[in-house]
Every structure is written in structure tokens, then in C-alpha cells.
Image (cartoon, rainbow, N blue to C red):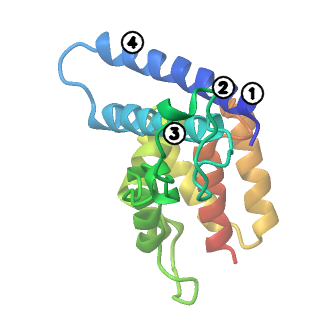
């Protein structure tokens, strides 16, 4: 992966985290849990990108391949034999537990019913976490607009009609085309109309 791309992603994430923190900081009273969770997730993404950047920063050398590292020319009596560094010594994260985002992704995949089960309504495919994210991020907190959109999407018999309606909603509400939340909703609609 290109370090420049990673630097760009880190910069974007940092801006997003800063905006989310300012929103939380300016919140009067109780902070909504979903806001805290979204901020935590972006901080985890930032950490993962930093970890990736750190891996890219290490340059391959003969260290770790069973050879002693080379040193500048020194008198022979001052050079001590160096124990070869084992590859496991270099990777501090080799036995790392899966990140929270990986666990969350697995949990989401497990909560969706298998494709073979008959699903009578689109709402059955949307778990409670996704519902709150859809309401907050796509429908500006309006439960009424969310319910109307889900009922309309549920009524389509043809997948392409549902996609066209979703595109109309995207244009009307000014949703970003590459939004992860929009992609998640589209994936659920695709599963329902499969």
C-alpha cells in the first residue's frame, strides 16, 4: 500500500474525529451513546491506519533473516557477536487479538439471517444498531422518514425499482455516493430482493 494514501486517510480521519469530538464537547446534557460509539470506531480506524503506516515504515533488511546486522567498520576487538533477531521478535502485533471493528463486523454478519430463510419484511434484516445508524446518518434523526422509506423499499417487487427509489432518496437527502451507511442499506435491500 502507498504511504501517501495512508497519510491522506489518516488526515481525513483526524478531521472527522476532531469534528465529532467538538460535537460531543458542545452537547448540553447527556451525550447520545451512538455519538460516543461512532467516535470510538473512528479512533479505532485511526489506530489501525497508524499501525499499517508503522508496518510500511519498517524497511526490509537482512535483520530477521538469520544474519547479523552490518555495522560500520570498527576495530575487531570492539565488535561483539550479535544474536540473530528472529522474525517473531520484530512483529509486536503478530499475536494481536482481532480489533474491535473486526469483532463488530463479524457480529453484524452473524445477526443477519441466512439468505435461505424466508424473510417477510425488510425490517427483519435490519438490526437495532443499523436502524439507529440509518435514522441518525441518513434521515437526520427522523424516525418517520426512515419508516416511510423502509415501507416503500419493502413494497417493491423488483430489485431495480428499489435501487431507483434508493437513488432518489440519495439525491433528495444529499447522501454521499460512497457512504458506508448508504452501502450497508443498499446491501440489506439487495439481500431482501435476492
Q: Choose the circle earlier in sequence order: 4 or 2.
A: 2
Per the rendering, the mark at residue 186 is none
- Discs 4/2, front: 2
Task: State the separation of the CA atoms marked 2 and 1.
Answer: 5 Å
Q: Are marks 3 and 2 in contact (CB under 8 Å)?
A: no
Secondary structure at numbered mark 3: helix
Closest to the observer, 39 or 145: 39
Residue drawn at 55 percent across, 26 percent down: 13
How far is the residue under mark 4 from the one under mark 1?
27 Å
CB-based contact (under 8 Å), mark 2 and mark 1: yes
Q: Which residue is mark 1?
A: 4
**Which residue carries the number 4 mark?**
22
Q: Which residue is mark 2?
A: 7
Mark 4 or 3: in front is: 3
Among numbered discs 3 and 2, the one appearing first in the sequence: 2
Kindly state the secondary structure of the residue where label 2 is placed.
helix
Amino acid at each position: 500500500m502507498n504511504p501517501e494514501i495512508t497519510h491522506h486517510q489518516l488526515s481525513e480521519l483526524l478531521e472527522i474525529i476532531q469534528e465529532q469530538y467538538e460535537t460531543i464537547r458542545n452537547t448540553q446534557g447527556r451525550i447520545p451513546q451512538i455519538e460516543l460509539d461512532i467516535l470510538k470506531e473512528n479512533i479505532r480506524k485511526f489506530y489501525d491506519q497508524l499501525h499499517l503506516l508503522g508496518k510500511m515504515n519498517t524497511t526490509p533488511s537482512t535483520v530477521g533473516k538469520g544474519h547479523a546486522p552490518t555495522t560500520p567498520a570498527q576495530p575487531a576487538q570492539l565488535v561483539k557477536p550479535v544474536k540473530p533477531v528472529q522474525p517473531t521478535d520484530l512483529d509486536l502485533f503478530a499475536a494481536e487479538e482481532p480489533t474491535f471493528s473486526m469483532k463488530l463486523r463479524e457480529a453484524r454478519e452473524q445477526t443477519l439471517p441466512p439468505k435461505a430463510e424466508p424473510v417477510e419484511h425488510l425490517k427483519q434484516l435490519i438490526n437495532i444498531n443499523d436502524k439507529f445508524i440509518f435514522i441518525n446518518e441518513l434521515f437526520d434523526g427522523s424516525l418517520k422518514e426512515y419508516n416511510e422509506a423502509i415501507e416503500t423499499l419493502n413494497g417493491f417487487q423488483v430489485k431495480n425499482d428499489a435501487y431507483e427509489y434508493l437513488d432518489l432518496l440519495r439525491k433528495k437527502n444529499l447522501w454521499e455516493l460512497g457512504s458506508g451507511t448508504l452501502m450497508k442499506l443498499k446491501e440489506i435491500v439487495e439481500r431482501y430482493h435476492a
